[in-house]
Image: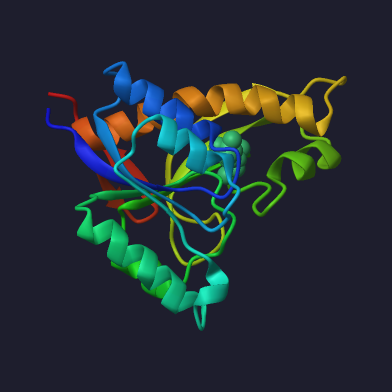
Amino acid sequence: MARQAIAVMASGRGTNLAAILEAATQGKCPVDVRVVISNKADAPALRIARDAGVETILFLNPKDYQNRTDYDLACADVIEKAGCQWVVLAGYMRILSSAFVQRFKHRLINIHPALLPAFIGADGVGDALRYGAKVAGCTVHLVDEEVDSGPILAQVSVPVLDSDTRESLHARIQKEEYKLYPETLRRMVEQGFSLDGRRVIWNQSI
Ligand code: GRF
């Protein structure tokens, strides 16, 4: 199965990006991370991309654009020019404009550190802990125009322990993210899926 080119958008540490790059190198995930874009100049994700030899690495400053749509379309142009089939959000902390979401419809995915539809938003881990949930986890999903609301591709649960802090719970969730994100990308490339309403139906493996 030929590798498919992807773009990763990241605002922060980039540990999910690192996990995807590592899985790709090990032959566990048939993707070629061709573009990495960040909206933060000092995002460690940019250094991870550089160290891995990603072809196109870009910091685009939102302040240089008139509005959200202009910024997103500049990102979209770079991604399309590089021939990326998928856009993978990995800790990308900006809301995407409708124009961007439409342009990559069903090809734009995100990972969220909670079991959706519970605990959407910027602090899914803290919200689950404060709520008193006994099970937390992570969700890989298609991105639509609402926050953390697109069809679910894959989920994994982890227990919440009485001794947990936000940090310890997030660390336990992230360990699962590093397996779930590359594995879901692999299935997207090798297996494919269709949509039945909101339900993602994975194609039968051949
Ligand atoms: C992850 O926990 C992911 O679920 C959320 O943001 C975090 C990004 O972490 N969307 P990293 O930058 O990949 O380390």
Residue 113 in the image: above or below residue 142: above
Q: Residue at x 70, y 31 (%)?
A: 170
> On the image, which quarter does residue 205 sit in?
top left
The one of 45 and 153 positioned closer to us in this rendering: 45
> On the image, which quarter does residue 28 sit in?
top left
Report the residue that reaches farthest toward the bottom. Answer: 66
The one of 118 and 2 positioned closer to us in this rendering: 2
Looking at the picture, the colour scheme in use is rainbow
Q: Is residue 115 visible?
A: no
Residue 201 in the image: above or below residue 11: above
Q: Position of residue 16 (x, y in %)?
A: 50, 33
User: Which quadrant is the C terminus positioned in?
Assistant: top left
> On the image, which quarter does residue 176 sit in?
top right
Residue 155 in the image: above or below residue 150: above
Q: Position of residue 168 (x, y in %)?
A: 77, 24
129 relative to 50 in the view: left or right? right
Q: Residue at x 51, y 48 (%)?
A: 10
Q: Residue at x 38, y 64 (%)?
A: 75
Residue 206 in the image: above or below residue 7: above
User: Which quadrant is the N terminus positioned in?
Assistant: top left
Q: Position of residue 203 (x, y in %)?
A: 21, 35
